[in-house]
Image (tube, grey):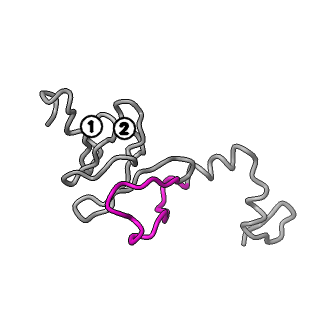
């Protein structure tokens, strides 16, 4: 409880209702700094899976036994990486085959093997 406009105690719910649009945006943006459950671990299948978190699409994938989250975006042409597949501990884009490691780094471009790690 905290002091409100009239000097008496009010709950957090009442204070939230008093936020203006800018205050709501600050509150919403502050949520990006916290962990959020988006899926049960047993529901994460073999391939990448798309979820929406705070108005952002995210691809979840189990790579080498650990769950990783990526922006659901292939940097090549903006395809949804969640439509791809897990390939040797990495995610491979379904459209042109770009391969991303668990840290999100592109490590293979099939059409330009000389640029691959």
| Residue stretch in magenta | 31-52
Number of the label disc, if any, that sits on residue 57: none
Residue beneath disc 2: 74
Residue 77, image quadrant: top left
Task: Give whichever of 33, 42 is nearer the camera.
Answer: 42
Please tell me which residue is depicted at 48% across the width and 55% down the height of the picture: 51
At label 2, counting other C-alpha atoms closer than 10 Å, the crowd grade (few under 14, some 14-19, many 20 or more) is many
Q: Where residue 8 sits in the image (x, y, percent)?
A: 83, 70
Residue 80, image quadrant: top left
Q: Are marks 2 and 1 in contact (CB under 8 Å)?
A: yes
* Residue 38 colored in magenta in the image: yes
* Residue 39 colored in magenta in the image: yes
Task: Give whichever of 24, 76 is nearer the camera.
Answer: 76
Instruction: Classify residue 84 as left or right of residue 32.
Output: left
Please tell me which residue is depicted at 80% across the width and 63% down the height of the picture: 4
Task: Give whichever of 52, 82 is nearer the camera.
Answer: 82
Instruction: Classify residue 84 as left or right of residue 15.
Output: left
Q: Where residue 88 sits in the image (x, y, percent)?
A: 18, 53
Q: Where residue 96 sits in the image (x, y, percent)?
A: 30, 34
Residue beneath disc 1: 98
């Amino acid at each position: 409880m905290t002091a409100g406009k009239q000097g008496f105690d009010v709950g957090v719910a009442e204070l939230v209702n008093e936020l203006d649009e800018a205050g709501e945006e600050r509150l919403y943006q502050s949520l990006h700094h916290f962990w959020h459950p988006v899926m049960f671990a047993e529901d994460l299948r073999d391939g990448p899976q798309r979820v929406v978190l705070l108005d952002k699409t995210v691809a979840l994938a189990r790579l080498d036994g650990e769950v990783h989250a990526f922006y659901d975006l292939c940097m090549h042409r903006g395809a949804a990486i969640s439509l791809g597949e897990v390939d040797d501990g990495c995610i491979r884009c379904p459209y042109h085959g770009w391969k991303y490691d668990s840290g999100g780094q592109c490590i293979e471009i099939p059409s330009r093997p000389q640029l691959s790690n």
